[in-house]
Amino acid sequence: MFFEILNKYGAIKDNRASYDEKVLRLYKRYNIPPIEIKLDYVDNILKEFLDSDKSLIVTGSAGDGKTFILRKLFEKLGGDNKEFKSICKVNNITFILDFTAIENKKEIILEAKNKKYIIAMNEGLLNEYVNKDEFLIKDLSKTSSANNFDLLLDKVLEYIDKYETKNECIIFKNIELLKEVRGKIRDIILMNDFNYEHITIRRLFVFISNLILGSKNQNLLKSCKDISFLESNLYSNIFGENLSASMREKKPFEFLNRLSIGYKSNNEIDNLILYSKDERFKNIYFDVEEFFRKRDSFLDNGDYNLIKDYVVFFRRDLFFRHKQNSLMRYISFEAFKTLFDDLKDNKPVSKRIKKLIALALNRIFLGALINEKDNLYIGSSFKGSNKKIANEIIEKLDIKEINFEFIKGNDEYYGEIYLVIKNKKMLLDLDIFEFLVRIANGSLVNSFSNEFLERVMIFKSHLIDENEELILFDIDENGKIELTEFELGDNYVRLQ
């Protein structure tokens, strides 16, 4: 029963939004209550609204749950759910469920400045019609996708346990493995949060449905016992390999595929897969002896097609079940997670993180592979030079001047991190942090997208103070900086 409903949430041809009548009819047919997740921040939004003299605007992308939030606010204010419609009132508070459908938009906004309104509005109309200082704005994209994934998955698994009978088909093998590796999948969703790439609740429904029911075989629900693991295993479904190219370009599959899990590897891992009979090869989908036989044939005749799908499977299995984090793009994830948690909990940032950032910025700002991490050096070029990175003029700062600012979102699991130096700020996401970590570890700047360098250099331009004294520097054989200060006058240069 429930699998049929869950399938309608998935990324199939006739997929409708999670609020669609087609899905609700299925819930009614099987006498199953529609899935709802408890969003703790609704109470915080309500309290902030009641304490404010401003009207509330709830914004976000389609599928973020704006109508759901308004319904909960309506109920908490004493409204009858039967009276919840496109425009409704409770306690002299007017609710507008879809500002897009309102014709007299300007009049409504003017009235909402003097009377209490709660309005659901997309971001485009928000920017067109609203002075943000005059309203209480709650952007649902500033909530944790990882936390929403946990809440939604808990509900889906609860419904499966309650409304489905377990059997030996591949669907339940996917569920069994999902329960084991959900923490690693959550980490991947968290990487989206750390890059401020929000995944809507609707897209999370699509994702979870595909994890469990995704298959290259369209008859999975009817004949799942006969489906090959290669067509429908959890690891393939995580990356949407059963989906069309256009569906894989949507969230979260587009981001997940950028991680290259299953295709990124190293000699140690591949030697393990190709030559050993490690206990870690045991899995719930197939008898590992089947793989060993095909591997022996490959080693004899060199036909890689015999095992290529198995190699991808085992690389992913080593990543998800056995914590082989070297098999993905972000080597800095755990460090960024620690930084995020420390800032969220108002703990001091470790000196190790500050030194790492100082070392990376020194190498970028000065354009040299230096080893200085106890101070920050801001390089510039002489006036008239068009060079982006030069080493003629620098300012020396103590690493104590490297600070961070944490801006909280709607829930306790979301926040934005800013790197702060000399009261100037740069948004620090996982991509930029990874860039800095790899530079600190010895990678060259030109190994990365130019976008990352441009973002850091724009930040550097805000840090340069043209009134600073000029300091020349040289680099010794150990990568240490030697400074020579001098004073530049109209007709002279004087060493300090």
Image (cartoon, helix red, strand yellow):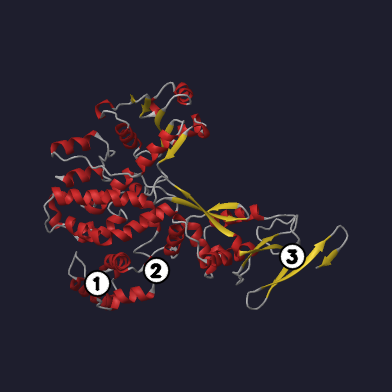
Query: Amino acid type of disc 3?
Result: Ile
Report the residue at 41% width, 52% height from top: 193
Q: Which residue is mark 3?
A: 471
Query: Amino acid type of disc 2?
Result: Ser
Label 1 near label 2: C-beta < 8 Å?
A: no
**Above or below, 23 relative to 89:** below
| Location of residue 62 (image quadrant) | top left
Nearer-N-terminus badge (2/1): 1
Residue 425: % across, % down? 57, 52
Nearer-N-terminus badge (3/1): 1
Give the quadrant of the N terminus. top left
Give the Cα distance between marks 3 and 1: 59 Å
Q: Which residue is mark 2?
A: 326
Visible residue check, residue 333: yes
Give residue 281's mark.
1
Nearer-N-terminus badge (3/2): 2
